[in-house]
Image (cartoon, rainbow, N blue to C red):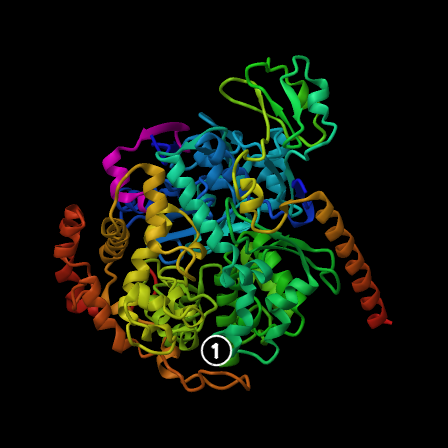
Amino acid sequence: MYGWAGQRLRIDLTKGNIIKEPLSSEYRRKWIGGRGFNSDVIYNEVPPDMDPFDPRTRVCFGMGPVSGTAAPSTGRVTVSCKSPLTGGFGDSSMGGHWGAEVKYAGYDQIIIQGRAKKPVYIWMDDDKVEIRDASHLWGKFPRDADTIIKQELKDEDIHIMSIGPAGENLVRFACTFNDIWRAAGRTGHGAVIGSKNLKGIATRGSGSVKIARPKEFFAVCNRLRQMFKNDPMKMGLYEYGSLCLINFANRDGWLPWKNLQYGGTPLANNMSGETHSKTVLKHREGCYACPICCGRFTHINEGKWAGEEFGGPEYEHAVPTGPRVGIIEDANDIWHNARLTNDLGMDGIETGAVISAAMEWYQRGLITAKDTGGLELEWGDEAVVDQLIQDIAYRRGFGNILADGGDRASDKLGLGDKGHYYTITTRGMSLPGDDPRGLGFGYGLSFAVGTRGGCDHLRSLCCLELSGALYPGLNTKILGDERPAKPTTTVGKPYMVYYEENQKTVTDCLNVCCFTTHWSYAVLTQDQLDYFNACTGMDMTLEEFLEVGERVYNLERAYWARLMSGAREDVVPERFTKEPMPQHVDYQTNVGATLPIDEMLPKYYKYRDYEPGTGFPSERTLKKLGLDYVADDIRPLRKRYMSESEQKKKKYYY
Amino acid sequence: MEKVLIYDQEKCTGCRSCVVGCSLYHEGECSKILSRINVVRNERSGESFVAGCDLCTDPPCAAVCPTGACALDPKMGISKIDQNKCIGCRECLIHCPFGAIGIHPVNKKSFKCDLCEGRSEGPVCADWCPSGAITWVSPEIAAKTKKRVKLQERINAATKAKEVS
């Protein structure tokens, strides 16, 4: 067996069963790995009407065929489950070294089901797997749990996946960590893992990944690594981390200021990568086999939070509990908040987003200090943000309401449509710290249609749009047209999103990092196929390769269809269509912009071959992709989706 | 000038590109334990250290080898282990000050860095290192560079002190 380990591990925590299941060659070819394996399991084994906290629900950790190899950045893991935040399909991916370690231990995927009677953790020592008591770890931060487990197992070199207190307390946007700091942030599977009384998985792998054509594989990897050496994108990310985006974001008006009311702030440079590197950077960090190394390790030197240190932050991690809630003057406050969400085990994006939504409700007079237990939710008040983050994690007071996510909180407080207007979500999940009125209309489109709700910057990750202007000719090479390189145009965007979604899905199936794709000329899709083929010995064509992405994507879309979510839910928050971008920074380039989503959606539907009325994947496409059983599943649902009673329902989450 | 491998621990990001590259180049498989070079990570404090052969001119691994399997190759400037003579006693593993000796999981004999003998671009680890923690340079140039770096650090510190006062 080359590339894949060829088996997956299924652990039933109720019964204490540990089962190893072989993965057939056809199965591997059909789904490739990682997100593909996970999505298949979630679709088949977790019915759409099951409660996300039901013991029978599954949490899957997927690794890919090239995980643990010398291809660029191969330590990633995709975590999937039915999301407790959106109620729909949810997955998220994390970097670090744990994914490679699991591969070396001999597994392509781990499926967790059932619920342990008391807190446990799993110890995988190659093929020996045991379930151990974790009562003493419950309530601990990931960093402390990590230290204790390593001492207990007498090996400092093992790698550990764990959740924090927020996951244990079923905060609906709790996340999963590995190597303490690397988070799979979105969709809230940390809470699902917590509901299973599982604290973490410690892994030691002493095996290897076998390569079908080692010389060819080495040559491809070597070529790509040489490309990265002089790559400007790599140099920016290595030097300043993803915070290198802050000043660009501020100029182009997509840095969220006060819940995306504005696209920037004059003081943005306080938290830029340049400033971070000069003031609080302790070390640069790299995930497994990464040629970029954008990871940071921060040590706060002065002020109230002096002495705090943590791994991170990244752009998307720092922005929500920073400018999005109106904090920018003292960047140490931002680093401190990022440290807090890390230690408590929550998605930094969702945490900042719900707090900023609450602050806007307060600003607009929808809620008062009476609703918040006395807290005055003024923009930029660090003391309030600090307290709310902790209250959310421990489900105390007003934090307990916010811990269910923005849209649920709005309903609990009875704020009606107005409340939902300010939550900036799609399908129940908050958008990340990117305003599509400035970042690009392609991103805006993918926020509307993405298959995990709120859909985040990573679903389609239109790197062609973001870095297109830096690399002349890149868009032409990939899309055959240079015009889509401009962020604020609709030209070519429907096809770009369609292409990028398939491409990023297959990237998640390989489980390599999105940063090692065509942000620059360093790694094109053909290069990914080259190393995939040399590694596994398969001889896929580019068409078949991208078709796997399309298959997985359509399967996920069908999962939503089974939840009665389709065309009517393909919307963006009204703020982007109704409020022209106001000016807040002198040199801002996107003043007056709105997101012309309606111009793009119909064309996108044509590329996807979604049905115009329902927005469900068409029978024709599903059959072409070998998903006949999915076509059978959703055939009877069309009529119901179009029925009058369904049309009247307003759905924010499921 | 002969080149050597220089490790700058301050710069190591712990990404293990060197590890996986070494294993693939020498063994045709990707693994941590098959690599001649290793990285020790301390996730909690964010520190990483690279443990590879430091090309001693008077190598302890050769000095303690009871069979003469491990000996300095004067042409390459590195000690090498003759797999036919190695008896797998692990004396070299215990005495190497840098943890640069590995034990092969199949034949249980010692193995170590051979500078990717014959590779025109130099050792894979240095070639692939994204942060400059591992460099393949002549020791004379490395020493000169280090002096300049240290001097610059002092100048920076003095300038900063002046700004503060």
Q: Position of residue B122 (x, y in %)?
A: 56, 41
Placement of the C terminus of chain B among the 4 image quadrants: bottom right
Does A45 sit above or below residue A408? Answer: above
Give me the residue at 65% from left, 33% from top.
Answer: B53
Total marks placed? 1
Placement of the N terminus of chain B among the 4 image quadrants: top right
Give the amino acid type for the residue marked by disc 1 in the picture. Asp
Most foreground residue, A224 or A417: A224
Whether residue B133 is visible here, answered yes or no, is yes
Q: Position of residue A417 (x, y in %)?
A: 36, 75
Q: Which residues are magenta?
A: A12-37
Does A577 sit above or below residue B75? Answer: below
Give me the residue at 54% from left, 38% from top.
Answer: B19
Corner quadrant of residue A267: bottom right
Whether residue A116 is visible here, answered yes or no, is no
Give me the residue at 41% from left, 52% from top.
Answer: A92
Corner quadrant of residue A475: bottom left
Q: Position of residue A540 (x, y in %)?
A: 25, 44
Q: Position of residue A284 (x, y in %)?
A: 62, 53
Most foreground residue, A277 or A90: A277
Disc 1: which residue: A252
